[in-house]
Image (cartoon, helix red, strand yellow):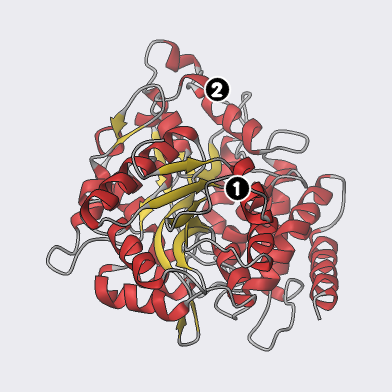
């Protein structure tokens, strides 16, 4: 504990929201929950909050929340009449779930966006956090799903950039030899990365989980095409067996895969900045930076039936809760997204915190320019802009423009949250490894989501 700022662990928070006596709930501090709950990130948030208190006189209490416990904790807090004032690093599905339970002060979110300047945010980020004319949250940052590929192998084979279904399939088929898999992609039914990878690829083919009339469409022509595409990749050109986030990363870092679908968090590991996930390819023994220098990055991907290229990404936001200390909460969120605090916030993990607020009204690219120079990594620190070429940084910087997420444009965020926990698409993808056809997988996933939809009525 330092001064008037206190760090409260998730365990203590559970006691606080249930109403037990802890001695920490009696003061009038602004209560801020943060889902950035790693120790170093909480400490960084602590430093920012201390400066805010020094400048404003508003005391702040930060509560570190595990994402897996969030839903239970927020509902318990709301039922007890003790919700937080502010929540930070809130994913899209959780944002929409809170909106569905009428726990968000959407007018406060709109006022914050208006004060900071709507033009300073990525338009797509604002769209994903808006429900009709209500701004649910203030978008902060996010990570992008990317396809990383071996530029050296592609050049030697005369292959083009793998940014379409056809080019990806051609590259996977051509390079799937000599102990190298054509592509590494998560296929485990129990790994959220499986559904995320499929959703990103499917969105580029015009596949939506649900349409504007509330009808589940996972078994339509565009989605069947996406299942056929993924089925060919995982059964013909990938490592055998179900793959998860860790195994796909290990395969690519070992130089045993020509492509990988992963999040932008892979970039510090490719750059040899994390001791527990170092590049281990044969060339990496002499040159740890070999894979980073010889890897290209594709963001948005287009299928033959899609109108525009698209990619998956997770966007996190700040929210003000109903019943909050409204003016103090608004002031805190504005502070977290402005010049004094925002660079430190996104600087906690630049590879996974691509700024959704790109700059200020006076300097529209202020934050994206600073982001490229921020040291990334865990055990070694180095700016991504020093490791990767301008075209890679541009793909990352502009990724939020291409984020497509099932259900949110159709105002079905609550259904997406329920479907996420059941993982019907991940289960359908893994089933194809055992002989389920692409059409059968599409039909089964659609039936499963319809059952989830029915259970919510």
Q: Quadrant of the N terminus?
A: top left
- The secondary structure type at the circle numbered 1 is helix
Position of residue 93 in the picture relative to residue 274 (left or right)? right
Q: Which residue is mark 2?
A: 254
- As drawn, which residue projects farthest toward the left? 362
In depth, the one of 9 and 246 nearer the eye is: 9
Say few, some or many: other residues with alpha carbon within 10 Å of mark 1 (under 14 / 14 to 19 / 20 or more): many
Q: Earlier in the sequence, mark 1 or mark 2?
A: 1
- Numbered-mark total: 2
Marks 1 and 2 close (CB-CB < 8 Å): no
Horizontal relation, residue 1 to residue 431: left or right: left
Determine which of the numbered discs, if any, sits on residue 264 in the image: none
Instruction: Please tell me how crowded label 2 is: few (under 14), some (14-19), or many (20+) other residues with Cα within 10 Å.
Output: some
Most foreground residue, 378 or 328: 328
Tell me if 107 is positioned left or right of 175 in this view.
Answer: left
**SS at circle 2:** loop
Horizontal and vertical percent position of residue 238? 68, 38
Viewer-side residue, 380 vs 345? 345
Q: Position of residue 232 (x, y in %)?
A: 71, 50
Instruction: Please provide percent x and percent y for residue 274.
Output: 44, 24
Depth-wise, is mark 1 or mark 2 nearer the camera? 1
Q: CA distance from mark 1 to mark 2?
A: 42 Å
Residue in view at x 71 percent, y 75 percent: 221
Q: Is residue 388 visible?
A: no
**Residue 236 vertical placement versus 363 (above, below):** above
The residue that appears at 26% across and 47% down in the rendered structure is: 51
From the top left corner, tell me how far across and down residue 249 is, in percent.
57, 32
Instruction: Examine the rendering and report whether any part of residue 283 can be seen.
Output: yes
x 59%, y 81%: residue: 410
Q: Which residue is mark 1?
A: 13
């Amino acid at each position: 504990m330092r001064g008037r700022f206190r760090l409260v662990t998730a365990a203590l928070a559970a006691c606080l929201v249930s109403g037990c006596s802890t001695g920490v709930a009696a003061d009038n501090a602004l209560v801020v929950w943060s889902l950035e709950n790693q120790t170093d990130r909480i400490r960084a948030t602590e430093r920012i909050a201390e400066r805010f208190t020094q400048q404003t006189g508003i005391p702040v209490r930060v509560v570190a929340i595990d994402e897996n416990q969030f839903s239970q904790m927020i509902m318990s807090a709301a039922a007890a009449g003790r919700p937080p004032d502010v929540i930070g690093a809130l994913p899209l599905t959780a944002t929409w779930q809170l909106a569905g339970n009428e726990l968000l002060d959407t007018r406060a979110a709109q006022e914050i966006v208006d004060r900071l300047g709507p033009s300073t945010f990525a338009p797509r980020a604002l769209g994903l956090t808006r429900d009709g004319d209500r701004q649910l949250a203030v978008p902060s940052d996010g990570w992008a799903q990317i396809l990383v590929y071996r530029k050296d192998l592609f050049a030697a084979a005369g292959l083009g950039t793998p940014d379409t279904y056809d080019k990806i399939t051609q590259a996977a088929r051509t390079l799937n030899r000599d102990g190298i898999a054509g592509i590494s992609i998560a296929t485990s039914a129990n790994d959220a990365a499986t559904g995320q990878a499929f959703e990103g690829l499917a969105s580029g083919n015009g596949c939506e989980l649900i349409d504007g009339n509330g009808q589940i469409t996972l078994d339509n022509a565009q989605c069947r095409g996406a299942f056929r595409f993924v089925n060919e990749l995982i059964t013909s050109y990938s490592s055998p067996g179900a793959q998860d986030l860790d195994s796909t990363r290990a395969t690519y870092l070992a130089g045993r895969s020509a492509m990988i679908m992963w999040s932008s968090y892979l970039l510090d590991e490719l750059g040899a900045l994390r001791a527990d996930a170092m590049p281990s390819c044969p060339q990496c023994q002499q040159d740890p930076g070999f894979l980073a220098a010889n890897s290209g990055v594709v963001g948005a991907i287009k299928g033959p039936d899609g109108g525009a290229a698209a990619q998956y990404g997770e966007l996190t936001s700040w929210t003000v809760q109903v019943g909050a200390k409204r003016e103090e909460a608004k002031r805190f969120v504005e502070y977290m997204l402005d010049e004094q605090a925002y660079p430190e916030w996104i600087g906690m993990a630049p590879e996974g915190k691509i700024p959704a607020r790109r700059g200020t009204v006076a300097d529209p690219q202020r934050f994206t320019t600073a982001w490229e120079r921020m040291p990334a990594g865990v055990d070694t620190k180095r700016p991504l802009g020093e490791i990767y070429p301008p075209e890679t940084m541009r793909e990352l910087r502009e990724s939020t423009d291409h984020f497509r997420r099932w259900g949110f444009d159709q105002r079905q965020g609550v259904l997406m949250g329920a479907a996420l926990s059941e993982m019907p698409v991940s289960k359908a993808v893994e089933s194809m490894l055992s002989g389920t056809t692409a059409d059968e997988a599409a039909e089964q996933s659609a039936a499963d989501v319809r059952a989830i939809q029915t259970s919510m009525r």
